[in-house]
Amino acid sequence: MALNTSLEERLAAVEAAIAQLQKQILAKEPTNWLEQITGSFKDEPAFEEVLAYGRAIRQGDESLLQAEDEL
């Protein structure tokens, strides 16, 4: 019988922990992923190069991309 009591106590502890986790999840404010990453690459040397590639692709300028392929 002690085993059943122990099992019941353990189950109650697990249920309490789950209830606490659910409260934490519900209390959390939704985060804006864009605000979290804004500015995170500002000191990255390759970031400007990536921006230039993106600009070239959007504008249909493949010369920048071809110049890199030739290197």
Image: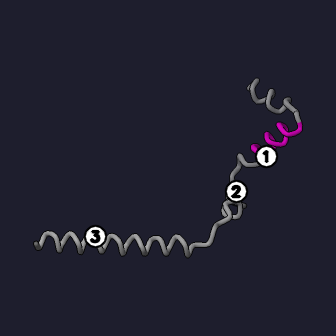
* Residue 54 forms part of the magenta stretch: yes
Q: Secondary structure at mark 3?
A: helix
Choose the circle earlier in sequence order: 1 or 3: 3
**Residue at position x 75%, y 44% from top?**
50
Query: Seen in the image, is 69 located left or right of residue 60?
Result: left
Q: Which residue is mark 1?
A: 51
Q: Is residue 41 above or below residue 60?
A: below
Q: Amino acid at mark 1?
A: Leu
The N terminus lies in quadrant: bottom left
Query: Which residue is at 28% across, 70% downward?
Result: 11
29 relative position to 59: left or right? left
Residue at the spot of label 3 = 11
Residue tagged 2? 43
Q: CA distance from mark 1 to mark 3?
A: 54 Å
The kind of secondary structure element at disc 1 is: helix
Residue plotted at (57% across, 72% down): 28
Looking at the magenta stretch, what is its main secondary structure? helix
In the rendered image, the residue lying farthest to the left is: 1
Q: Mark 3 belongs to which amino acid?
A: Leu
**Magenta extent:** 49-59
- Name the residue type under label 2: Asp
Q: Could you say which quadrant of the image residue 59 lies in?
A: top right
Q: Residues within 10 Å of mark 3 (few under 14, many from 20)?
A: few
**Residue 36: which quarter of the image?**
bottom right
Disc 3 or 2, which lies upstream in sequence?
3
User: Above or below — where is 39 with respect to 57?
Assistant: below
Query: Which residue is nearer to you in this view: 28 or 66?
Result: 28
Q: Could you say where residue 13 lies in the image, as x and y percent from the top left?
A: 30, 74
Q: Position of residue 55 (x, y in %)?
A: 84, 42
* Mark 2 surroundings: few (<14), some (14-19) or many (≥20) residues within 10 A: few
Q: Is residue 10 magenta?
A: no
Nearest the viewer among 16 and 41 is 16
